[in-house]
Image (cartoon, rainbow, N blue to C red):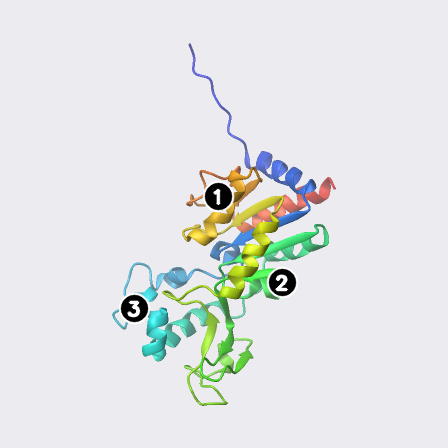
Amino acid sequence: MPKVQIKKSSDQDKIKRIADLLRGAKSVLFITGAGISADSGLPTYRGISGLYNDKATEDGISIEMALAGETLETKPYITWKYLARIEEKCRGAKPNRAHEIIKEMERYFERVCVFTQNIDGLHHKAGSKNIIDIHGDMYKLICPHCMWRRRIKDYSEIRIPPVCPECNKIVRPEVVFFGETLPYDKCQILLEELEKGFDVYFSIGTTSVFHYISQPMVDAKANDRPTIEINPDHTHISDIVDIKLPLGAAEAMEKIWSEYKNCT
């Protein structure tokens, strides 16, 4: 007997399915990673001009070690040097259509939550209100000694490493470096949001390597909630989600939103 050919869903079919799911939804969760900022010109730290791809830094250590909490404590000049280089490559970036559409969706749904790994602040710049930036924001500075705080536009406003104007100690950005624990308050907010549940779950532009990033999608799938991944690459959750859309974030969100609004 001839083999039965199983036709795979086209991207357009998937987009229509996603739009249909959104039409019946009141709440949406977006889990975002570096991929959502790619169309804003922001690479991941390893992708900056290929500078750190599988290479040691000029200081003879990996970029992970350079950006580790331990290094920040003992050799802050090292951590700040590489963080400043990364920030310079990202400077001037603006939210793209993916960020903007997520913000716009707040007018159409009762509850929209953004759970992001990114420290670029682009969801904030786009105007989204309910953001859990679990790894922090590189433009928020804090002095761990006297708790002085300041938000800056970019690192051109500061000398590297920056010094606290109150106690003259070296300050740090409010971000989670390698080896540091996640902020308790943000973890609690995330748990509260997840306990409420969502009608549709999106994962956009993240490899979902970390357990706390992949678990909401895994739990949603187990609870029969619709799960959607937008990512051109195969990731740790690609095989478990209901719909895998292998497109870039801005292109995918533009097409989904256009389909949704055309028939709403």
- Nearest to N terminus: mark 3 or mark 2: 3
**In which quadrant of the rendered image does the N terminus lie?**
top left
The residue tagged 1 is 218
Q: Position of residue 108 (x, y in %)?
A: 72, 50
Neighbour class for label 1 at 10 Å: few (<14), some, many (≥20)?
some
Task: Specify the amino acid type for callout 1.
Answer: Val
- What separation in Å lies between label 1 and label 3 (alpha carbons)? 36 Å
At mark 3, the secondary structure is loop
Q: Residue at x 55, y 57 (%)?
A: 190
Q: Residue at x 62, y 36 (%)?
A: 17
- The answer to whether one can see residue 119 in this image is no
Q: Nearer the viewer, mark 2 or mark 1?
A: 1
Task: Specify the amino acid type for callout 2.
Answer: Ala
Q: Residue at x 37, y 72 (%)?
A: 82
The answer to which of 81 and 238 lies nearer the viewer is 238
The residue tagged 3 is 57
- Nearest to N terminus: mark 1 or mark 3: 3
Q: Position of residue 166 (x, y in %)?
A: 50, 90
The residue tagged 2 is 126
